[in-house]
Amino acid sequence: MTAAGASGPARDVLAVKYGHRVTTRAESYLNFHLYGEPDTDLDIDYFFWVIRDGADVFLVDTGFAPEAGDRRRRAHYGTPAQLLPLLGIDPAEVTAIVITHAHWDHIGNVRQFPRAQLVMTEAEYAFWTSPLAARRHFAAHSEPEEIELLAQRRQGGTLSVFTGQFTLAAGIELIEVGGHTPGQLIVTVAAPGGSTAVLASDALHFYEEVERDRPFAILADLPAMYRAYDTLAQLASQPGTHLVAGHDPAVRDRFAGYAAAWPPSQAEAAGDGGGAAAVTDLTRPHAG
Ligand SMILES: [Zn+2]
């Protein structure tokens, strides 16, 4: 662990965009017809998040498995095992993986990290290993063998669960909010310079959900989802605290790009805006 200075600990907090799709607003917002607006296309990005904390590397989610992405027709640009080395990180160095929830696009590459400790909420684990998870509206968003792997990791002692709040490391808090899934969690990360990044994952797919009070279309519990938006809005009202939405391309406008050790050839490989992996520095929010 690097010594903490007056400006706070040396810590990288990164969003890695690894996939993309074009969807629509009607498909993304619950009962979109209520708003009386025309439907339009909506870009959706897929991210996982990296916290590099001295010798420790924490991953927040792992993205989807390439084969599951192909089956569901999502463009994808790399798995954590492929992309972390471009950031100078050996995947074997990953200390722990936070599982924000058990949807397919967040736990698809857990198998790449046999030695990392996994952490998730008890409610999330209990739900996805229960019979209800097989019902169509839940099963549509999961991959059975990926849930089975979580169960194996729990039996093997490398998956731990918590309820409420859990301190992963100094300045890194996991907070259970529910709503989108039964045990969805968010992560608050104290960053160098005194700012705090709130990794909302799918408690907030798009900023509009909080800023225009529009619930996302996929959910387990609407009152809990609204309460999660209130929790996020309350956090965002605190000085220096910035929300990081889980699927919103605007993340890359609201924070600075991360240039260090990221080969430009990778960004150029697939051409224009939507078509390449990209890394955003969540310790450097743009003003405003
Ligand atoms: Zn997601």
Image: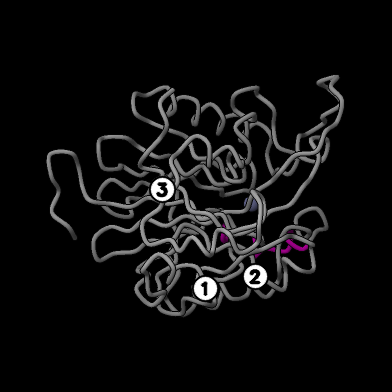
Residue at 46% in and 80% down: 114
Q: Earlier in the sequence, mark 2 or mark 1?
A: 2
Q: Tell me the kind of residue under disc 3.
A: Leu
Q: Position of residue 69 (x, y in %)?
A: 72, 65
Badge 2 or badge 3: first in the primary sequence: 2
Q: Nearer the viewer, mark 3 or mark 1?
A: 1
Q: Residue at x 21, y 48 (%)?
A: 9
* Quadrant hosting residue 224: top right
Residue displayed at 70% across by 37% down: 216
Q: Position of residue 103 (x, y in %)?
A: 65, 58
Camera-nearest label, 2 or 1: 1
Say if the magenta span includes residue 130.
yes
Query: Mark 2, mark 3: which one is toward the viewer?
Result: 2
Question: What residue is disc 1 on?
Answer: 82
Q: Secondary structure at mark 1?
A: helix
As displayed, is residue 236 above or below residue 276?
Answer: above
Sequence order check: which comes first, mark 3 or mark 1?
1
Mark 2 = which residue?
65
Magenta extent: 124-134
